[in-house]
Amino acid sequence: MPMTRYPSLEGRAVLITGGATGIGAAFVEHFARQGAKVVFLDIDDGGAQVLLDSLHDVEPLPRYLRCDITDIAAFQATIVEARELVGPFSVLVNNAANDARHALADTGVADFERSVAVNLRHQYFAIQAVAPDMRALGGGSIICLGSTGWMIKNSGYPLYAMAKSAVHGLVNGLARELGHDRIRINALVPGWVITEKQQRLWLDAEGEAQLRRSQCLPGYLRADDLARAALFLAADDSRMCTGQDFIVDGGWV
C-alpha cells in the first residue's frame, strides 16, 4: 500500500542511532526512501551491511558509521564525522537501546551504569551535539524513543524501565529551551513491537495471549508502524508539535 510522501524531508540530513536492525533499520529505510540523507550508527556491522544491501535501489544510499554510543567521546567524534558526510543535521532519531532482561536482586553498580549508558545518556549528548546544527538551520526535529514498558508496569527490566521513563523527562525538560529556536523534541513511544529479536526471544504462547487481551487493535505492532510515525514527527507537517508523547502501541496503554 502506498504511504505518505513528505516533501519537506527530501534532502534533509538525518542521524539515527542503533540503526542496523529492528526498529532502527525501519527508521533508516523509511527516511532514506523519502529522499533524506541518512547516517546511522551501530556496532552491528553485519546487520548494517544486510540493511544497506536491501537498499541498493535508494538514492542517496544511507551511510553507516560504526560507533559505540556508550563511549561518549567516541560518539561525539562520530557525529562530527557524520556531519562531514551529509552536512548539518535537521533530524535526530535517538533510537539506540537494549531491553535485556534482568532482576533487582541480580544487578550491581556496573549493570546500573551500563543500562543508563545504553538507554539514556547517549540521547542527551546526541541532542547537545546536533542542536547547534538545527539552530543554524532555523529549526529541526528531535525524536527520542521512549517505551510503554514502564507505563504498564512490566516486570523483568527495572533498569531499562527507569532509563526509558527518564527519556520523557528529558523531552519535557528541553522542549521550551529548544523551542525558542524552532527545534521540536518529542518522545515516540512504542508498545510491544514484534521484531525478529522479540519474536525469537520472548514471544511465546503467553505473550500471544497477552497481545490479544491488551491491544485494542488485532495483529502485531511492527517496526514500520513506528517509522511512519517518525516521518510525521520529522517533517514540517508536525511543525507545532513538541514536548509530547506519541504512543504507537495498538491501544495497549
Image (tube, rainbow, N blue to C red):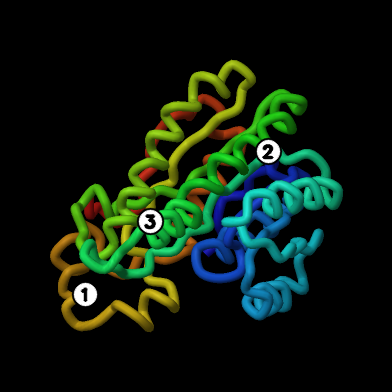
* 143 or 57: nearer the viewer: 143
Q: Position of residue 195 (x, y in %)?
A: 43, 72
Q: Secondary structure at mark 3?
A: helix
Residue type, label 3: Phe
What is the crowding at mark 2: few (fewer than 14 residues within 10 Å), some, or many (at least 20)?
Answer: some
Closer to the camera: disc 1 or disc 3? Answer: 3
Dividing the picture into quarters, in which one does residue 60 lie?
bottom right
Q: Earlier in the sequence, mark 2 or mark 1?
A: 2
Q: Residue at x 69, y 49 (%)?
A: 73
Q: Secondary structure at mark 2?
A: helix
Q: Residue at x 68, y 62 (%)?
A: 67
Mark linked to residue 129: 2
Per the image, the residue denoted by label 1 is: 207
Closer to the camera: disc 2 or disc 1? Answer: 2
What is the crowding at mark 3: few (fewer than 14 residues within 10 Å), some, or many (at least 20)?
Answer: some
Q: Position of residue 238 (x, y in %)?
A: 53, 33
Q: Earlier in the sequence, mark 2 or mark 3?
A: 3
